[in-house]
Amino acid sequence: MALKYCSITGADDAVHTKDLVALGTRYPFAEWAILLLPARAGAPRFPKAEWIEDFSASYDGHKAMHLCDAALLDFIAQKPETLALMRGFSRIQLNLKFGEMDGKYDPAELVARIRQSPQWQFIIQYGKDKSDLLPLLEGVANHAVLFDDSAGRGITPDSWPSPLAGHFCGYAGGLNPDNVKQNIDIILQAANDHDTWIDMETGVRTDDVFDLEKVERVLEISAAYAR
């Protein structure tokens, strides 16, 4: 059992892509996760399309895209501009807990889109309120589940759950350079014999600015657990 990825979320227009490339080269288990929400493009955490295209073309390592709000709906609707930005990424997280998404999409249609897109692994942002999705994903090879009750708010749960049978599971919520070692130890114990991954967003920011120093500290600590 080991960490397959250490996913760092929230790089934006203020971050030089060359810095991400350099860190990713030193720590090849790092996964840069980019948030896509066109309505907030250019704001902290949400880069513009031009930045995403430059980053995608510049970096050959692990890359994930998180589809938020309208971007998630655009994927379901197969909007060409969203699909074009997704092409440079290998994993796509569906942020079902970001914003008011309940009732805005048909879960069966979402899973149908996942089945039709085997070129990506889709990460389901999971909570007990999303458990109805799990039966729909039975037999769908290109999916994973992220335990994420925090949904980007930087709140660490009281305990980390065991993986769900039949699902590749990862963990997020309140991780930062000061607590990541302690939590990885607990997460790997909960994961038992399963590979897993961790994801963090708020914990690697300072005054809502992506903090490369914090990112590097996390990667240095995580390296001892990486596969």
Image (cartoon, helix red, strand yellow):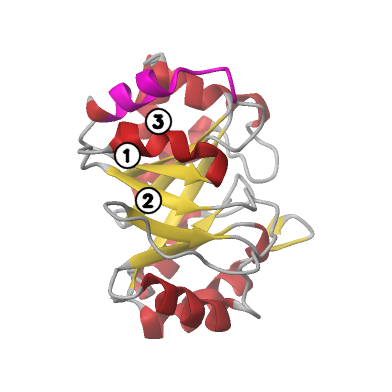
Q: Position of residue 164 (x, y in %)?
A: 36, 55
Quadrant of residue 56 within the rendered picture? top left
Return the residue found at the far right.
207
Quadrant of residue 200 within the rendered picture? bottom right
Q: Position of residue 185 (x, y in %)?
A: 48, 82
Disc 3 target residue: 85
Q: What range is drawn magenta here?
A: 102-114
Q: Amino acid at mark 3?
A: Leu
Q: CA distance from mark 2 to mark 1?
A: 8 Å
Q: Amino acid at mark 1?
A: Gly
Name the foreground residue: 132 vs 220.
Answer: 132
For the residues labelled 3 and 1, say whether their Cβ atoms are less than 8 Å apart: yes
Instruction: Give SS at disc 1.
Output: loop
For the residues labelled 2 and 1, say whether their Cβ atoms are less than 8 Å apart: yes
Q: CA distance from mark 2 to mark 3?
A: 12 Å
Q: Quadrant of the N terminus?
A: bottom left
Disc 1 target residue: 88
Residue 156 falls within the magenta-colored stretch: no
Q: Report the residue at 58% width, 39% height from top.
A: 47
